[in-house]
Image: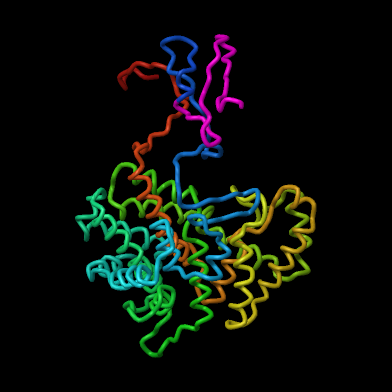
Amino acid sequence: MAKPTLTVTDNRTGQSYELPIKDGTIRAIDLRQIKESPDDFGLMSYDPAFLNTASCRSKITFIDGERGILRYRGYPIEELSERSSFMEVAYLILNGELPTAAELAGFTHQVVHHTLVHENLKKLMDGFRYDSHPMAIFVSMVGALSTFYKSSANIFDVEKRRLQMIRLIAKVPTIAAWSYRHSVGNSYVYPRNDLSYAANFLHMFKHLPTMTYTVHPVLERALDVLFILHADHEQNASTSAMRGVGSSNVDPYSAMAGAAASLYGPLHGGANEAVLRMLTQIGTKENIGELIRRVKAGEGRLMGFGHRVYKSYDPRAKVIRDLAKQVFEVTGTNPLLDIALELERIALSDDYFVQRKLYPNVDFYSGLIYQAMGFPVDMFPVLFAIPRTVGWLAQWEEMILDSDTRIYRPRQIYEGPGLRHYVPVADRK
């Protein structure tokens, strides 16, 4: 049987090195022994954007991008979306196993009874401009929570740590809904303990004092499924930010504010907004051919197609495509859905896109559903952040309990000037 090692020959010195291979990886620190001279620092790997670097070990989410597989703790996303609830999936992601009926009831009770936020936080929110972006408010409010819970700094105390995690999962829908209502000048609506996680958010988002808002069960279930689909996704930009900030042993509120700020970017949490803009610009199905022509000519991008990880159909996109049809039966048809379906059909029958493995991703349909449910595009990244809170916290806890964890400190390749000596300003030319 072949040895699980990699033999590297340094052609600068002619010396060979044997590096252990484990789980399909070599440890980057093992490269340091490869030196040109005794005073050489040693070889480093250069990997901008971490395209081929595993930064951690994790038991939470498994992705096989080539085969279009996504699993939480071993469970296929398709099964969870069809048969589970977000609260059940949240328990699974945090604890590693699906809950018993009693465990689920206890977990749900904990979350439900922590949905209120301190009244001072409402005053802080009132200080933002009337036209502030809801995601900017959300990021600030999450970070501010650390000032209300001083014990959150005790991250290695199991009971205190878990309490902060429950608080965050419970309070982010309230903060999210209030962030929107502040941005449009509506009064804040308090959470209700008799509603489900998704229904409670819809109630806080849509209820008006002048009328009674009743959550439609189809829309409640649709939002619950969307929350399941967005609960975690391995080491993406915001999760890496959560782990990076958290590696300094800061409290989870501060770490999550950093993760949410990463999600705010248009290349991450705002990607489905770009899809909506593209579909709106297309206007009619007759204009799809011209868009395809321009994309193939290098004159534009097909938004919502392709993914850094998935090299086949994004499994979340399959679930959302069917979900969109159910939502539109309640909200009414959306001509953009017809354009999206036709665009998908044309693209997937074109060798140009198939050969480049450009398939629809989760963002291609999610924005259509959010729009149909009455959410403005500014709320899209906030809607993403609500369920992803669970994944961020699970990843954060896994990171701080990992004996391999050190404070994040990537290396760099220095390209600046060599040694220079200071010259007084009067003598500079």
The residue drawn where x is 53% and y is 65% is 80
Residue drawn at 47 percent across, 70 percent down? 85
Relative to 383, is 372 above or below? Answer: below
Count of marks overlaid on the render: 0
Residue 282: x and y in percent read 70, 66
Q: Quadrant of the C terminus?
A: top left
Residue at far front of view = 1
Classify residue 216 as left or right of residue 125.
right
| Image spot of residue 42 (x, y percent) | 46, 18
Q: Is residue 363 above or below residue 421?
A: below
Q: Residue 326 appears at what percent x and percent y?
A: 61, 78
Q: Tell me which residue sits at (43%, 67%) in the image.
A: 88
As for residue 27 lying within the magenta part, the answer is yes
Q: Name which residue lies at 57% across and 67% down.
A: 367
Query: 259 or 156: nearer the eye?
Result: 156
Closer-to-camera residue (8/417)? 8
Say whether residue 179 is left or right of residue 356.
left
Does the segment drawn in magenta span residue 296? no
User: Which is nearer the eye, 1 or 159?
Assistant: 1
Residue 287 appears left or right of 279 = right
Q: Quadrant of residue 142?
A: bottom left
Residue 7, percent across and down? Answer: 57, 20
Residue range of the region highlighted in magenta in the rendering: 1-29
Q: Which residue appears farthest toward the bottom when viewing the image?
A: 211
Residue 312 or 410: which is nearer the viewer? 312
Quarter containing the N terminus: top right
* Quadrant of the image occupied by residue 345: bottom right
Figure coloring = rainbow
